[in-house]
Image (tube, grey):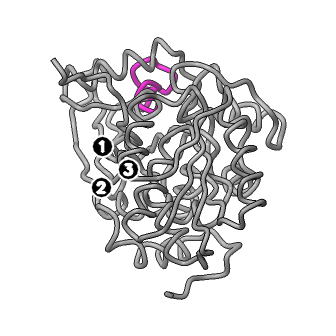
């Protein structure tokens, strides 16, 4: 087993170490540069990180492998609670590594995500209204069976894996003026913020119906927020994770809120203009630009993480 930094550290160095370990198992996802004028954003250069091209359809594969490759795996295997993407990623990583996996998802998980999890041969449990219900069921199961519970976001290993996205992006598109990242529980933006360490302005984007980052910034600490909207299966955590919060508080400039209508419009625009397919949570960061929730300066190079594409929005069964 490869050595890593102390388990409680999420730093540029520990993320770089994690990248070396997971590199043989993940894809270096591409970057697409586009003229913002195609979307009515005159004078802005867009740099889109196509993370929906990652294994299992989202950035979550990074954290899944970062956990499974360095942890001691019990005979009972691993378990994970998820809105869908993390579950698919853990199921995929477990399948590739020959590890038994049990995945818990809520009833709001999309059919596309449920189908992906099943395709990776994991034992799937669908139950409860929201992610929090799936997490509770997973924690009980892990305690009773001794499986390793791989947390979707509130884990240093998960955050290190997520942070490798920023390592790639810095190599592919150096010198960004601004980077937009969608926020669920904070694992992705926390990992990205830790790696960038203030070198790029970073804005978190979340649905108006799931404003956990906005509420945390207002309260000065993670607090419960409502969970709802079209992106609830990927951005529907109740509050920012405790592990990510100190990093986010120190290094994330602000939270931008977007409506469900803006998210759906962003999905449509990505498809119509660039033939890119993003799920609602994957398009949320882009929605902040199109809706005017974030207004970059003219001449800015703006990075946008398109974090997932597990959707049936484009249907080929016809």
Instruction: Decide: few, some or many residues near mark 1? Use Cα within 10 Å; few <14, some 14-19, many ≥20.
Output: many
The residue singled out by tag 1 in the image is: 47
C-alpha separation, residue under disc 1 versus residue under disc 2: 8 Å
Do residues under tags 1 and 3 come within 8 Å of each other at their CB atoms?
yes
Label of residue 176 in the image: 3
User: x, y (%) of residue 147?
Assistant: 66, 65
Q: Is residue 304 visible?
A: no
**Does the magenta run of residues contain 293?**
yes
- Count of picture labels: 3
Q: Position of residue 73 (x, y in %)?
A: 59, 75
- Image check: 138 left or right of 19? right
Residue receiving disc 2: 173
Main SS class of the magenta portion in the image: helix
Q: Quadrant of residue 244?
A: bottom right
Residue at point 46% right, 19% down?
Answer: 292
Relative to 152, say whether 280 is above or below.
above
Q: Secondary structure at mark 1?
A: strand
Q: Residue furthest top?
A: 261
Pointer 2 and pointer 3: residues touching (CB < 8 Å)? yes
- In the rendered structure, the answer to whether residue 56 lies left or right of residue 242 reads left
Element on which disc 2 rests: loop
> Which of these two is toward me, 316 or 65?
316
Quadrant of res 228: top right
């Amino acid at each position: 087993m490869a050595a890593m930094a102390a388990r409680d550290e999420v730093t540029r160095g520990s993320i770089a170490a994690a990248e070396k370990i997971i590199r043989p198992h993940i894809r270096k996802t591409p970057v697409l540069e586009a003229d913002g004028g195609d979307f009515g954003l005159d004078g802005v250069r867009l740099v889109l990180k196509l993370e929906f091209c990652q294994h299992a359809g989202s950035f979550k594969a990074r954290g899944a492998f970062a956990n499974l490759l360095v942890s001691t795996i019990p005979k009972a295997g691993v378990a994970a609670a998820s809105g869908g993407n993390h579950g698919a990623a853990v199921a995929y990583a477990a399948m590739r590594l020959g590890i038994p996996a049990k995945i818990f998802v809520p009833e709001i998980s999309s059919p596309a995500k449920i189908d992906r999890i099943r395709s990776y041969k994991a034992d799937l449990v669908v139950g409860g209204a929201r992610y929090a219900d799936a997490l509770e069921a997973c924690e009980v199961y892990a305690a009773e069976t001794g499986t390793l519970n791989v947390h979707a976001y509130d884990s240093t290993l998960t955050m290190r894996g997520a942070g490798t996205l920023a390592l790639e992006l810095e190599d592919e598109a150096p010198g960004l003026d601004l980077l937009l990242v969608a926020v669920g529980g904070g694992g992705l933006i926390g990992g990205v913020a830790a790696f960038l360490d203030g070198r790029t302005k970073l804005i978190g984007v979340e649905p108006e119906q799931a404003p956990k980052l906005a509420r945390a910034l207002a309260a000065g600490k993670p607090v419960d927020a409502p969970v709802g909207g079209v992106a609830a299966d990927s951005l529907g955590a109740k509050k920012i994770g405790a592990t990510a919060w100190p990093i986010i508080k120190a290094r994330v400039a602000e939270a931008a809120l977007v409506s469900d209508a803006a998210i759906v419009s962003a999905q449509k625009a990505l498809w119509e203009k660039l033939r890119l397919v993003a799920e609602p949570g994957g398009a949320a960061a882009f929605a902040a630009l199109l809706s005017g929730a974030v207004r970059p300066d003219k001449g800015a190079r703006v990075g946008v993480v398109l974090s997932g594409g597990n959707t049936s929005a484009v249907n080929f069964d016809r």
